[in-house]
Image: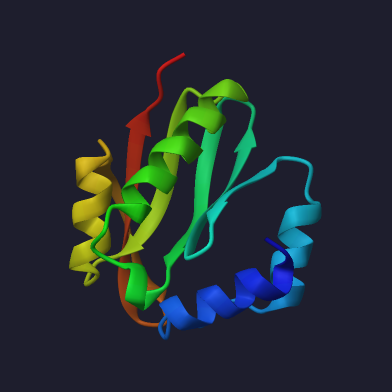
């Protein structure tokens, strides 16, 4: 997926927080530690530094939701992160995003922190999970 396609999909998936534009995706993809796991209707973008992975964003087009796409993308992204040496993964999720929170809980993530007002006034939960070597 190219940065323009990622930006279109991100804009379809997110209203709040602000969707990322193609330039932002291009800059992230140029970083040597970025990994993209994508499909036609969704993607996960993460980065791996040392032994930790950070999920930067996960987006699924509204018409493709509730079909297991995000679950599969996240599982493949976590496997790739482990293949790149990550032993743990972190992410932030909006406290009010029940669907995303449920997805991450099913994937083994647990809350380890809180960032008050992180998403323009809405709190973010900091989630963590261990990755298999």
Whole-percent x, y for residue 65 in the image:
30, 67
Q: What residue is shown at x 21% (from left), y 45% (from top)? A: 105
Left or right side of 119 for 27:
right
Whole-percent x, y for residue 20 in the image:
60, 76
Q: From the viewer's side, name the closer residue of 127 and 72.
A: 72
Q: What residue is shown at x 26% (from left), y 58% (from top)? A: 67
Whole-percent x, y for residue 43 in the image:
51, 57
Query: How many labels were placed on the picture?
Result: 0
**With respect to residue 21, does 66 lie above or below?**
above
**With respect to residue 119, does 78 lie above or below?**
above
Q: What residue is shown at x 43% (from left), y 42% (from top)? A: 90
Q: From the viewer's side, name the closer residue of 107 and 112.
A: 107
Quick one: quadrant of the N terminus? bottom right
Q: From the viewer's side, name the closer residue of 66 and 57.
A: 66
Whole-percent x, y for residue 129 in the image:
34, 33
Left or right side of 114 for 21:
right
**With respect to residue 99, does 74 lie above or below?**
above
Q: What residue is shown at x 76% (from left), y 75% (from top)? A: 23
Q: From the viewer's side, name the closer residue of 38 and 100.
A: 38
Its colouring scheme is: rainbow
- Residue at far top of view: 133
**With respect to residue 114, does 24 lie above or below?**
below
């Amino acid at each position: 997926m190219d940065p323009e396609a990622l930006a279109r999909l991100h804009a379809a998936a997110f209203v709040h927080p602000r969707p990322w534009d193609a330039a932002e995706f291009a800059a992230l993809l140029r970083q040597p530690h970025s990994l993209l796991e994508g499909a036609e209707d969704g993607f996960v973008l993460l980065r791996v530094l040392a032994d930790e992975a950070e999920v930067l964003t996960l987006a699924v087009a509204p018409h493709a939701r509730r079909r297991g796409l995000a679950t599969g993308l996240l599982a493949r992204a976590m496997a790739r992160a482990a293949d790149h040496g990550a032993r743990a993964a972190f992410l932030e999720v909006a406290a009010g995003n029940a669907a995303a929170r449920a997805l991450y809980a099913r994937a083994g993530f647990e809350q380890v922190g809180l960032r008050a007002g992180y998403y323009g006034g809405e709190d973010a939960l900091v989630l963590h999970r261990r990755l298999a070597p």
